[in-house]
């Protein structure tokens, strides 16, 4: 697992029936990653700012993505090859 703190582009889908969001595509370091599985999603509050944290898998990599709800910017916090661990 490699700790990172880098801006990332994330496309997501909102499902009004289940009232949930799901990251679908990640654009990072000039590459496009298709999300194959969304694992844990939780919310963290730091001060007045609310963050949504998603653990997702692609064909090759595991990402921990964080959405800052104050500015709607995404950060990749962690990345790993294969299964998270």
Image (spheres, rainbow, N blue to C red):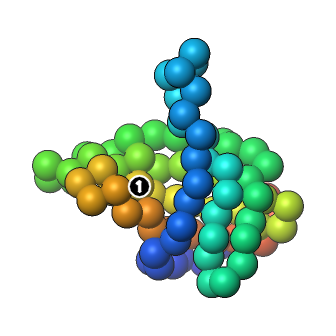
Query: What's the residue at 41%, 47% (across, down)?
Result: 52
SS state under label 1: strand
Q: Which quarter of the rendered picture does the N terminus lie within? A: bottom right
Query: What's the residue at 67%, 57% (across, down)?
Result: 25
Q: Residue furthest left?
A: 48
Q: Residue furthest right?
A: 59
Q: Which residue is mark 1?
A: 67
Query: Is residue 43 visible from the viewing direction of this image?
Result: yes
The answer to whether residue 38 is left or right of residue 9 is right
Q: Locate residue 35, reporting x and y percent.
A: 73, 53
Query: What's the residue at 41%, 55% (across, down)?
Result: 67
Q: Locate residue 85, reporting x and y percent.
A: 70, 60
Q: Is residue 74 above or below residue 40?
A: below
Q: Is residue 21 above or below residue 28?
A: above
Total residue callouts: 1
Q: Locate residue 79, reporting x and y percent.
A: 64, 71
The answer to whether residue 50 is left or right of residue 10 is left
């Amino acid at each position: 697992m490699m700790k990172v703190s880098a801006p990332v582009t994330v496309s997501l889908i909102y499902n009004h029936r289940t009232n949930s969001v799901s990251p679908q595509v990640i654009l990072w370091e000039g590459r496009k990653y298709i999300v194959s599985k969304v694992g844990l999603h939780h919310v963290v509050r730091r001060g007045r700012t609310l963050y949504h944290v998603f653990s997702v898998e692609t064909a090759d990599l595991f990402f921990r993505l964080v959405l800052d709800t104050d500015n709607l910017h995404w950060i990749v916090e962690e990345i790993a090859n294969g299964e998270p661990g």
